[in-house]
Amino acid sequence: MSKKPSQVKTPAAAGPPPQRPPGAALTVAGMDSSGGAGIAADLRTFQAHGLHGAAAVTALTAQNAAGVQACQMVPAALVRAQIRSVLDGVAPAAVKTGMLGNRAIVDAVAVELGTAGLPLVVDPVIVATSGARLLAPSAVATLCRRLLPLAAVVTPNLPELAALSGRAVSTPAAQRSAARILLDYGCGAVLVKGGHGRGRVICDRLITAGGEEYEFSHPRLVGQFHGTGCTLSAYLCAALARGAELEAATAAAIEALSGLLADAWPVPAGKLYYLPPWPAPGG
């Protein structure tokens, strides 16, 4: 009886290598109906950097570059539940905060992030460019005392720096002194955004707890832009999530944002800019 030749199994063709998880970042901020600022800007920025974006909504707003027309705060307990859900179910690599609104929400955020051990970017949204109050006066001290000690970097503009420090910030020396007050709360660095200053050149200053100072100068652009502070802080959050160094990430963020604003297009209220995929910081 003849035997059939043995069947030799050939290995299956190798498919594409498994993709590396992209990583995630969390934004805790308000929802802007115009899509120019807040969570909308943050999630676009995270995606542009190849990150999955998660969000905890603190406020629902009707706003555009002309101003804030209406605002409804989210209950603090729900904000806290949103953060916990993301921390447990998504495991973000970094977090940023934007509009927090009131003391109860600041407390809730501090409780949930206090033990998370994640890089945190605090964008201390206090007053909109239009003048609308976005953080209750009673919450300012709570933000300083409870949230700044958790922050890798805080990104105030000049009015916010004055409100947080209680100091005038009309000169570079005064800005440095005010930034040191924030550093004394325990944050790792302060990025003083100079857009509310005067002159044709804007100077942003990164001042670290270790005493280093870096200046980033760029031309002032004409126009009413909306959401630039949100995008800048979200860029830094994305960079920290990807493991970039803060100084390099800050320089890259300012340069990239300046380019976006230069190419922005006009709408009935202000100008809008589009976020294309940006080179990932540090890689």
Image (tube, rainbow, N blue to C red):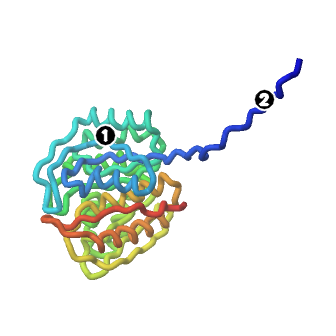
Q: Which residue is mark 1?
A: 107
Q: What residue type is disc 1 on? A: Asp
Residue 74 falls in which quadrant of the image?
top left
The mark found on residue 7 in the picture is: 2
Instruction: Give coordinates of residue 255: x percent, y percent.
Output: 40, 71
Residue visible at 17% across and 48% down? 61
Q: Outermost residue toward the right?
A: 1
Residue visible at 14% across and 46% down? 71
Label 1: element kind = helix
Q: What residue type is disc 2 on? A: Gln
Instruction: Give coordinates of residue 208: x percent, y percent.
Output: 46, 63
Residue 174 shows in the view: yes
Whole-Å distance between the Cαs marked 2 and 1?
68 Å
Q: Outermost residue toward the front?
A: 1
Answer above or below: position of 202 versus 193: below
Residue visible at 78% across and 29% down? 7
Which part of the image, by quadrant, shows the N terminus?
Answer: top right
* CB under 8 Å between discs 2 and 1: no
| First in residue order: circle 2 vs circle 1 | 2
Instruction: Give coordinates of residue 70: x percent, y percent.
Output: 11, 49
Q: Outermost residue toward the top?
A: 1
Is residue 2 rendered to the left or right of residue 89? right
Residue nearer the viewer, 67 or 265? 265
Looking at the image, is mark 2 or mark 1 nearer the viewer? 2
Residue visible at 49% across and 66% down? 248
Residue 187 shows in the view: no
